[in-house]
Structure formats: structure tokens, C-alpha cells
Image: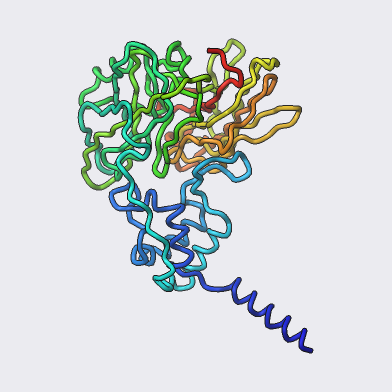
Amino acid sequence: MYRAVLFAICLSAAAGTAGAQPTFSKEVSRILQAKCQNCHRPKDIAPFALLTYGDASTWAADIARVVREGIMPPWKPVPGHGEFRDSFGLTDEERETLIRWAEGGAPEGDPADLPEPMAERGEWALGEPDLVLTMAEAYTPPRGKDMYRCFVLPTPYDSDRWVTAVDVLPGDRSVVHHAILYLDTTGEAERLDAAEEGPGYTCYGGPGTPIFSDARALAAGGTLGGWAPGARPHHLPEGIGMTLPAGARIVLQLHYYSTRVTAEDQTRIGLYFAKTDVERRLTFLPIVPLDSRGRVRMEIPAGAERHEVQATFATPPLALFNLRAIHVFPHMHLLGKEIRLDVRRNGEWEPMILIDKWDFNWQGSYTYQSPVSVPGGATLRLRCTYDNSTNNPRNPNAVPKLVTWGEGTEDEMCLAFLGVVFERSFF
């Protein structure tokens, strides 16, 4: 009898603990701090802060809705398809906690349970950069309209430099949605800039420069990466660097967020150079669909609701070509629905990244938790799925039409830049 009563008491206590109502002070504040506050803070891109109980309780119903629907936080990679650093995606337990808190009256709890506030960010997360480049003029994006604009940033060096980290400081975080840094050694970016009035020039899918025929920029990887809200800069592993070609221009592509207020932006970028010997060059391997003559080519038929485009890249079957992937940047436009990259090694396909709810406005570069092996003889396979029907609210064509590869709003891309290094050093 005693044992039965004791078991019932323990069972009741366990059930009570499991069903305890979450509070802001004890559980919710920690989740918001870890996954939301990098954006939801004053003067940042999010439309409201989530730092205090007053902040969060005001938006409790909306928090429950966007969390349940998977709209927020906007971490796109699907779990189990690559492990990435600095993930701000919610676990199932965190999602359930936020929903239960909001639907349970959003209780505050005991303020004594609150964690220490997040430390204030310094201007540059990694300390003062070795080189700071600033947009030549401030730019005021039009109100109420999403837009993409490129700004040319000349570099002052007459010899190549090794870059180990890049940071981006938006002039006004409330309007800068994300940034991509391209390299140009042809001078084409400056010509495009000069041909258009005002600071910078209009760009969309890319910088408008010949990134696939600019030999020096392509040899350096074509890009120095990018930035998105919540992203944290990191130095590359020791002995690895990205090349900044002598005399190159950095083309800073900024996505300006739709806003009802007038805002002036003058974004800066900070470059950090190698302080020790670089043994391996990080280069960005572009994986794109090619035809039999090696030309970039793809077609998406008008009206197709789920059309797949594939691109493959096979490494030569020699140990000389063993690679390690450091990070990946997948890219499509407005018709994109799903993008996935897999690697076939030892006869088995293994996932490297899957984004099953593509959103052009929330694209980003993702750094692997640990470098991913791509041995000689492996095959990389990129699969992009598109909806070119009237059922796609983002279709830029009211009447669907055949869509091909291109950088314009009405064009499409199926592209992944894979940041890789050779296991063996060649210099």
C-alpha cells in the first residue's frame, strides 16, 4: 500500500512538472535571448523589440502564430541536413514552450528568475578591422518598396591579400535586410555605377558583372561572403584564407527592406587579414546547371507547379582533389520553392543542406559546424524546385511564361556557392 501511494505521489509530481506553465522570466526570456534578440532589439531590422516582459507580452498572440506557422525565426535549413554554426532555429521543445506561454495568458513569473541581459555589442564584433570600406555616399532607399542596389568599394592594394574574416555594419539596420559581397576585377561594376544616377546602381540576382568569366575574381571565389540579421562574423580556421585580388573592387549588394519611414544608409564593411601563414585558400565552388557545351542553362516551363532543375559537379577521383566544405550559400529567385545539396561518397548520398520553404528575402550563407569531407571522386548534386504557376503569389509574371537563367527579377537561378579548401596545401 505504501509503495502504491508513493508511486502515485511521484507520478503526480512528475506530471505537474511536465505540465507546468512556462513564464517569461524563467523559460521564455532565455529562448528569446538565444534565438530572437539579435534582430528584435532597438534600431535593428525587426519592427519591435523583445527584450522585456512588456515587449513580449504585447506581442504574445503574434509570437504564438508565427512560431506555430514556422514564419519566425527565419532560420531556413531543415534539421538533419547538415549541421551549422549559430543556428537560431527553434527546437520542438522551444516552439512548444513559446506557444504554451502565449496561449496560457503570457505570465511574467518571478523577475528574480531572469537571466543576465545580453551584453551590448561593440561596433565591430571581432575588434577593429584591418581595413574599413564605406559607401562613398549615403543612400536613401524609396519608402514602401523592397529593392536591391549595388555599391562599388575600391580596394587600395597593389598585391593580393589574405582575408580571414569579414564583418558588415549597416548604416541603418532598420532598412538593410541582407548584404552579399562580390568581387570584380574587370571594371564593369564601375561602368554600371557611372551609367546610373545617384549612389550605386540597380542589381538583383547578382552584381551585373561577368562573375563567371572574370578569371581573377573567379579564381578567388567570386565573393567574400555576406551578412544577414543575426549573423555573427567568425575568423576562418587557422591556416585558411580568402583571396582579395590586387586592385579588386568589392561590389556590395544590399537588399533594402520595405519601410514606411525615410532612412539614410551608409553601410561599412570591415576586412580582417591573416596574421599567420595561410596554407589553404578558401574558394567558392559555383554549382550551376550546365548544358552539353558547358554553358549555364536552365528552363522552367510556364505553368509548371513543381519543376526540378538539377546541377552536378564531380571531383576527379584522385586524393589530390580531396576537399573540405566550410560553408554554403544556396541561391534562387522568386519562383524557388525548395533547394537541396547532397554529396555522394562511398556510394551513398548524404545531405549537405535542405531548404524546403525557400524565401528569396531570407537567403543567407551557412557555416558548417565542422568541415564536411568531399573526397576526390565524390559527386555534388544540387536540386532546385520551382513553382511557375499562378498559384505562386511571388511569381513576377501575372501570366506565367517560360523562365530561363538570368539575373533579372523575371529570370531564375539554380546556384550554390560551396566554400571549400583542398585538404592538401598547394602553396
Farthest residue toward the bottom? 1
Farthest residue toward the front? 276
| Snapshot quadrant of residue 244 | top left
Q: How far from the left and from the top, in percent, is residue 86?
A: 49, 44
Query: Of 247 and 337, which appears nearest the observer?
Result: 247
* Residue 178 in sight from this viewpoint: yes
Q: How far from the left and from the top, in percent, is residue 102?
A: 46, 67
Q: Residue at x 61, y 21 (%)?
A: 423
Query: Of 218 and 147, which appears nearest the observer?
Result: 218
- Residue 293 drawn above or below residue 379: above
- Counting the numbered discs, the total is 0
In the picture provided, is 370 more to the left or to the right than 334?
right
In the picture provided, is 419 more to the left or to the right than 112?
right
Q: Residue at x 29, y 32 (%)?
A: 268
Q: How far from the left and from the top, in percent, is residue 6?
A: 72, 83
Q: How far from the left and from the top, in percent, is residue 332?
A: 49, 32
Asked which colour scheme the image uses, the reply is: rainbow
* Residue 402 in sight from this viewpoint: no
Q: Residue at x 32, y 47 (%)?
A: 44
- Residue 29 drawn above or below residue 276: below
Q: Which quadrant is the N terminus positioned in?
A: bottom right
